[in-house]
Image (tube, helix red, strand yellow):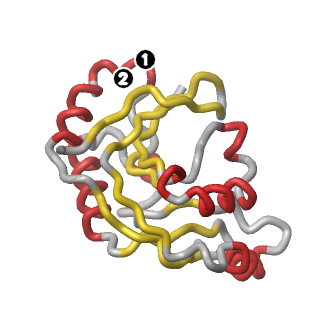
Amino acid sequence: MGTAITLFLAEHAPELAQAHDELYPERIPENIPLSLTLLYPFAPIEELDDYLQMARDFFASRHPLSFDIAGVAQWEGGGAVYGVPEPDGQLRATMRALWELFPEFPPYGGAAQDPPPHASLTLDGGDDPHTLLSRVEERLSGLLPAHFEVDEAVLMGEHEPDVWRVLHTLPFQR
């Protein structure tokens, strides 16, 4: 079973979180709210104790994150639509430092080099990938920009395949 380090965004923007659940209903049974992944996959659950204190210390040494999701974008080829955080400098620096601290867990298993920070809003392009972006923009009309002040990361783990739960919170420097 896997783990991930993420930022929960749902409580900061409940209406956007509701739209996320409507647009990405697959996440509901997985127990994954509107969020922004910092590192996935992280340590296997059976090895988590070896890395937990390092992760706690990492976040305790960093300032809370502040950003807006002001727009959306779509991955190439009619893929998933995601919220774009702006400014993304603090997020990118945090993600890159986390990846550097844990090089044995490259982001997305090494499938993406330096992936941008993003808050997934849909699974994929579905049956009509060419209109997905406009459908998401229409659903989010009036909800963006959404502002986020995030003072903790969340370590999630699978407790059964594709069903996640919070294992630990990792507070930022206070």
Residue at point 85%, 68% (across, down): 127
* Image position of 4 (left or right of 165): left
> Would you identify the image quadrant in which residue 88 lies?
bottom left
Query: As shown in the figure, which amino acid type bears the numbered disc 2?
Result: Leu
- Front-lying residue, 45 or 88: 88
Tag 2–tag 1 contact (CB < 8 Å) = yes
- At mark 2, the secondary structure is helix
* Residue 130: assigned label: none
| Residue marked by disc 1 | 46
* Image position of 94 (left or right of 2): left
Residue at the far right in the pictured view: 127
Q: Give the percent coordinates (x, y) of residue 63.
A: 19, 53
Q: CA distance from mark 2 to mark 1?
A: 6 Å
Residue at point 65%, 66% (across, down): 80
> Would you identify the image quadrant in which residue 89 lies?
bottom left
- Of the 4 image quadrants, the one containing the N terminus is top right
Q: Give the percent coordinates (x, y) of residue 113.
A: 38, 62
Query: As shown in the figure, which amino acid type bears the numbered disc 1?
Result: Glu
Q: Give the percent coordinates (x, y) of residue 118.
A: 47, 63
Report crowding for label 1: few under 14, some 14 to 19, many 20 or more residues within 10 A (C-alpha): few
Number of marks drawn? 2
**Is 171 located above or below residue 89 in the figure?**
above
Residue at point 35%, 58% (across, down): 149
- Front-lying residue, 42 or 104: 42
> Would you identify the image quadrant in which residue 102 lies?
top left
- At mark 1, the secondary structure is helix
Report crowding for label 2: few under 14, some 14 to 19, many 20 or more residues within 10 A (C-alpha): some
| Residue marked by disc 2 | 48
Q: Give the percent coordinates (x, y) of residue 159.
A: 58, 22
